[in-house]
């Protein structure tokens, strides 16, 4: 290493030790006497491990505790954290015990969907800030309650739609606002993921070390089944919201963000469980159309889930290498259509534009960012406007997914009155805006 590079890198390290990776002084956080933000991660088997890795690399942040109903997962992650950071986190099985710990500043939720809102509300009531995975709610009503709790207790609550914090997509949204493709009238969300059958499995004994009753939480009491447990819970209405509420919620959020709309006036969704005979209950193929009133004009979101072999659209999932064109088996992204061109977004951190009738290449960018870093920044500043993915934005995007699923489940179009927050002229569909809870895991009527 050249001497000038060594001096420059040494200066950078010294600055980082004082300021931290986010550009703030790590001794200024008012919520903890030593200036360190103490985070607890709840649900650490799958996506929760991503949360752990994000916080572990940040200066001025300590993974002070982890919580999981599976003892083997809990012990494994605890050991990994101790090895990576030099500090062993506290271990909890019950979220309620964790929330009694007054040394915890924030919790980061990566549990199954049916727990998200209730944990978030409990955390707000306990004075904790919250990072909650997408979707923030299992039903429309409980998402509304989570927003109310965040406001009542003045908590920082960030939604796990990661694209909101990537450099490329924030630039893409600004380009749309500036009119790069003209008047944007339609957005498409693409969730084409090659997912194999989950097969059929009988009910059986709960694995050793798993607190299954606590895992069920708000959901109805049912026997243990591996096809309703790790990851495959996504495909059962009691715990998940199908792929439109799994991978698809990211693209649904981008659709709404780019189109500049909030809640729809009309929704129609159809599809089914095609090709496989297995335990999946939610659709593996689904098309949803959502109509909006945008400044007196109609605007449209078209969302599609496909589960098997499919084409790639607008170049999404395709790239060139030394062998030529390479096409991925998945096609995940968005397409925006305007009066002067279209924009293709791939994943969370890349966009391209194509302008005019000849589809000439326009502005493009590929650059990521960290939604977790943005969350910690807002925790420190105590300013809601510092959040890129405030919980109210998360609730509005999750609402589109909920309404699409309701239309699919009742088998007809629905009309939504956003002022009254009700599905009109359809009592059956309107009743599905909320669910029944199993005591004592009840989302409160008054937060």
Image (cartoon, rainbow, N blue to C red):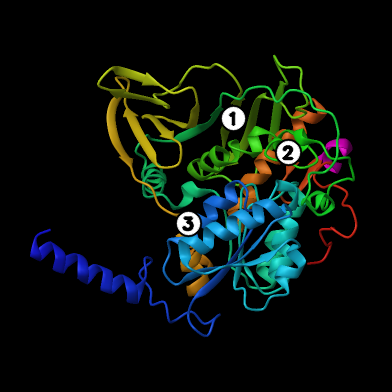
* Residue 52 visible somewhere in the drawing: yes
Q: Which residues are magenta?
A: 424-431
Instruction: Name the residue beneath numbered marker 2.
Output: 233
Residue 354 occupies which quadrant of the picture? top left
Q: Earlier in the sequence, mark 3 or mark 2?
A: 3
Q: Nearer the viewer, residue 75 or 302?
A: 75
How far apart, in angstroms, are the residues tagged by discs 2 and 1? Answer: 22 Å
Position above or below: 367 against 9: above
Position above or below: 57 against 167: below
Position above or below: 108 against 313: below
Secondary structure of the residue carrying tag 3 is helix
Q: In the image, residue 270 lies at what x, y percent?
A: 71, 23
Residue found at x 81% / y 54%: 214
Q: Work out which residue is located at the far left of the displayed protein and give it.
A: 3
Q: Nearer the viewer, residue 215 or 387?
A: 215
Number of numbered markers: 3
| Mark 2 Cα shell of 10 Å, populated few (<14), some (14-19), many (≥20) | many
Instruction: Name the residue beneath numbered marker 1.
Output: 303
Instruction: Name the residue beneath numbered marker 3.
Output: 54
How far apart, in angstroms, are the residues tagged by discs 3 and 2? Answer: 25 Å
Do tag 3 and tag 1 residues touch (Cβ < 8 Å)? no
Indicate which label's residue lies in the foreground, 3 or 1. Answer: 3
* Residue 264 visible somewhere in the drawing: no
Q: In the image, residue 165 lies at what x, y percent?
A: 44, 53
Residue 16 occupies which quadrant of the picture? bottom left
Magenta-span inclusion, residue 428: yes
Q: In the image, residue 34 lies at what x, y percent?
A: 49, 83
Indicate which label's residue lies in the foreground, 2 or 1. Answer: 2
Q: Earlier in the sequence, mark 2 or mark 1?
A: 2
Q: Work out which residue is located at the far top of the displayed protein and give it.
A: 275
Per the picture, the main secondary structure of the magenta-coloured stretch is helix
How far apart, in angstroms, are the residues tagged by discs 3 and 1? Answer: 30 Å
């Amino acid at each position: 290493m050249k001497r000038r590079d060594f001096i420059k890198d040494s200066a950078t390290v010294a600055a980082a030790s004082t300021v931290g990776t986010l550009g703030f002084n790590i001794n200024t956080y008012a919520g903890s006497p030593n200036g360190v933000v103490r985070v607890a991660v709840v649900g650490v088997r799958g996506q929760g491990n991503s949360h752990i890795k994000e916080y572990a690399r940040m200066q001025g942040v300590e993974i002070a505790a982890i919580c999981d109903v599976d003892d083997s997962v809990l012990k494994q992650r605890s050991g990994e954290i101790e090895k990576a950071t030099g500090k062993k986190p506290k271990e909890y099985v019950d979220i309620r015990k964790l929330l009694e710990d007054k040394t915890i500043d924030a919790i980061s939720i990566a549990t199954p969907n049916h727990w998200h809102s209730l944990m978030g509300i409990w955390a707000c009531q306990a004075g904790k800030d919250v990072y909650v995975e997408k979707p923030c709610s299992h039903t429309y009503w409980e998402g509304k309650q989570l927003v109310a709790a965040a406001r009542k207790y003045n908590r920082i609550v960030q939604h796990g739609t990661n694209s909101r914090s990537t450099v490329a997509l924030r630039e893409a949204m600004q380009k749309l606002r500036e009119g790069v493709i003209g008047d944007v009238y339609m957005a498409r969300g693409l969730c084409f993921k090659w997912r194999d059958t989950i097969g059929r499995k009988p009910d059986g004994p709960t694995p050793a070390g798993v607190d299954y009753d606590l895992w069920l939480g708000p959901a109805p009491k049912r026997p243990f089944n591996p096809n309703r447990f790790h990851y495959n819970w996504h495909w059962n209405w009691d715990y998940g919201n199908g792929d439109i509420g799994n991978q698809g919620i990211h693209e649904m959020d981008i659709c709404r963000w780019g189109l500049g709309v909030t809640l729809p006036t009309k929704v129609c969704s159809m599809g089914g469980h095609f090709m496989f005979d297995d335990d999946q209950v939610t659709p593996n193929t689904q098309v949803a159309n959502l109509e909006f009133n945008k400044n007196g004009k109609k605007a449209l979101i078209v969302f599609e889930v496909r589960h098997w072999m499919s084409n790639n659209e607008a170049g999404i999932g395709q790239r060139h290498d030394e062998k030529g064109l390479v096409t991925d088996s998945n096609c995940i992204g968005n397409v925006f259509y305007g009066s002067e061109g279209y924009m293709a977004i791939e994943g969370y951190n890349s966009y391209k534009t194509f302008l005019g009738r000849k589809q000439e290449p326009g502005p493009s960018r590929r650059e990521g960012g960290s939604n977790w870093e943005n969350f910690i920044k807002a925790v420190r500043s105590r300013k809601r406007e510092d959040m890129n993915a405030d919980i109210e934005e998360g609730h509005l995007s999750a609402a589109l997914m909920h309404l699409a699923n309701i239309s699919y489940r009742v088998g007809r179009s629905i009309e939504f009155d956003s002022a009254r927050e009700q599905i009109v002229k359809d009592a059956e569909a309107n009743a599905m805006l909320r669910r029944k809870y199993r005591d004592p895991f009840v989302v409160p009527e008054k937060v």
